[in-house]
Amino acid sequence: MIPRVKRAARIYSSREWRLVRQIVLERDGYRCTVCGILVSGRGEARVDHIRRVSDGGTLFDPNNLRTLCAFHDNEAHREKGSGSAVRQERFELIGCDVSGIPFNRQVHHS
């Protein structure tokens, strides 16, 4: 069996992933689908699976993908590093300022 990290690295560096990622970014207007902040810089845009592939989500289907900023991508994956196999997505939709930064947060998007 191929280790999960190597398999993921191959998938996310594949031509098919790069193409579907570009489709999703363009569809979402290069904006986080949670807070609306522009994520057009290198490393700012995260394309995230709405339903994990391990939970039956489709890998390359744009309907199962969304654009997130780094902050909301981390919020969508709180289970990472916790040892939990269950996705712990919890967005606190409290509104955003005109820059797309959520209110009542001490978070800086870079």
Image (cartoon, helix red, strand yellow):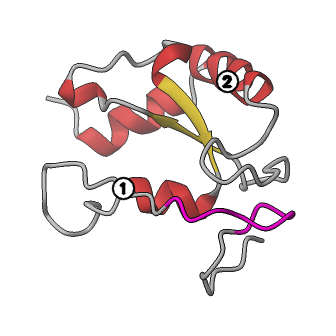
Between discs 2 and 1, the one toward the N terminus: 2
Q: Is residue 21 magenta?
A: no
In x, y percent, where is residue 98?
A: 86, 63
Q: Is residue 74 above or below residue 60?
A: below
Residue 59: image quadrant is top left
Residue 102: which quarter of the image? bottom right
Spot occupied by residue 90 in the image (x, y as percentages of width and height): 36, 58
Indicate left or right for 30 with 87 as reference: right
Q: Residue at x 56, y 16 (%)?
A: 62
Name the kind of residue labelled 1 in the image. His
**Callout 2: SS:** helix
Q: Which mark is residue 97?
A: none
Amino acid at pointer 2: Val
Specify the label residue 24 is tagged with: 2
Q: Is residue 16 left or right of residue 85?
A: right
Q: Looking at the image, which is closer to me, 12 or 54?
A: 54
Q: Residues within 10 Å of mark 2 (few under 14, many from 20)?
A: many
Q: Which residues are magenta?
A: 93-101
Query: In this figure, which residue is indicated by the disc labeled 1?
Result: 77
Q: Is residue 95 magenta?
A: yes
Q: For numbered disc 1, what is the local secondary structure?
A: loop
**In the image, residue 11 above or below residue 31:** above
Q: How many marks?
A: 2
